[in-house]
Image: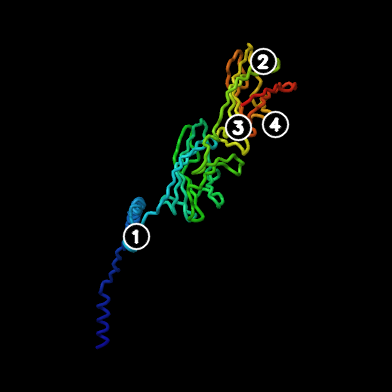
Amino acid sequence: MDKKKAMTLSLIRAKVEVRPPLPKKPEPPKRSFFSRLWLTTAILLLVGIIVVSIVSLNAGSWLKGVHVPDVNGQTPTPIPVTTLPVQRTAPYAGIDVTVGNAQYALAFPDDDIRQGQATVRLNVRISNHTPDQINLVYYDIARLLVPNTPALIPSDVHLSVGPKPGATENGWLDFSLPNKAAQLNALILQLGSTTLGETLVKIPFTGPFDATHFAAHASPQTTTIAYTFFGHSLTYQLKSVEKRFAHKGVQCKAGQQFYVLNFAVDNPEGGDISPGYGFDYIRLVSPGNERTPIDNTLPYTFKANAKGVSGSVVFSAPSGLNKLTIGLLSQNGNGELDTDINI
């Protein structure tokens, strides 16, 4: 019986139709999920950058307006500032430097560089009345003289390198004090480079002060010099002599001055005469030395029948000279023509 049942079951299984397995549905690509995630992240990052930029732009101005109370709930007391009116002007390198006032404080709100225990601020006006572009390196030329203290170098400068011709600007020089003690009325501003050996200009904030000492002085002249150049005659009329401590933005050396000889030249002949530039044949004969010009505006050639051709010749010589000797070289080996003038 068991054998018969087994055969029957075998026949039933044989009749069952064997079907192939159904194909699996393709899984959705995983990249689509990550693409959406990346896009969402990128949008969030962009929004975050925009928000941070807006906050950064407004944070500075917002913080400036915040008044932080102290532990007792009170606004901090402003740092006191002592001010000394000065209103003194002196020329340096062709620039007029005016100290309006001097201020003392333990710190100034707009002082970005604080190196000492207190700060002296000089509010100054810089005026360039010359036709020249003049550059000033204040960290080199400006010093604050404090009694019993080495000369102080500026700790902060709020001025341009130099005003343009005909321009005026206002700003300040800050000097950090090594200690808190300072008497404003005992301070002096010194201008001039000791490294370059320049003539130093000092502006005391109180006490005696000669504002005209470093100013230019002109001495009118009426001297006429007949100059012969290889058989050709020129007439040099000396109109004036200027004594200066500065020329074209350059401060003279200590113990020296610039002497500017202003000429008007006539050529009475019918042909052009070319003696060369003033560098070539005009000299200043000072004690123990014959000096060549440091600057010249006389032309190389004087045209036929020209009259009153103006030009200047500039020399550097010891300061305080009241008598000069002008030498015109013959340029042919026969010596020079010397002329004495008083200034």
Picture layout, residue 233 above or below residue 88: above
Q: Quadrant of the C terminus?
A: top right
Q: Nearer the viewer, residue 80 or 49?
A: 80
Q: Which residue is mark 1?
A: 34
Q: Which residue is mark 2?
A: 233
Which is more N-terminal, label 4 or label 1? Answer: 1
Q: Secondary structure at mark 4?
A: loop
Residue sitting farthest toward the bottom: 1
- The colour scheme of the drawn protein is rainbow
Q: Secondary structure at mark 3?
A: strand
Crowd class of label 4 (few under 14; some 14 to 19; many from 20; radius 10 Å): few
Residue 225: x and y, percent?
A: 65, 19
Crowd class of label 3 (few under 14; some 14 to 19; many from 20; radius 10 Å): many
Q: Nearer the viewer, residue 131 or 101?
A: 101
Which is more N-terminal, label 3 or label 1? Answer: 1
Q: Looking at numbered disc 1 in the image, what kind of residue is underneath it?
A: Phe
In this picture, residue 78 sits left or right of residue 132: left
Q: CA distance from mark 3 to mark 2?
A: 29 Å
Q: Looking at numbered disc 3 in the image, what kind of residue is underneath it?
A: Phe
In this picture, residue 320 sits left or right of residue 59: right
Q: Which residue is mark 4?
A: 287
In this picture, residue 54 sits left or right of residue 306: left
Q: Nearer the viewer, residue 35 or 194?
A: 194
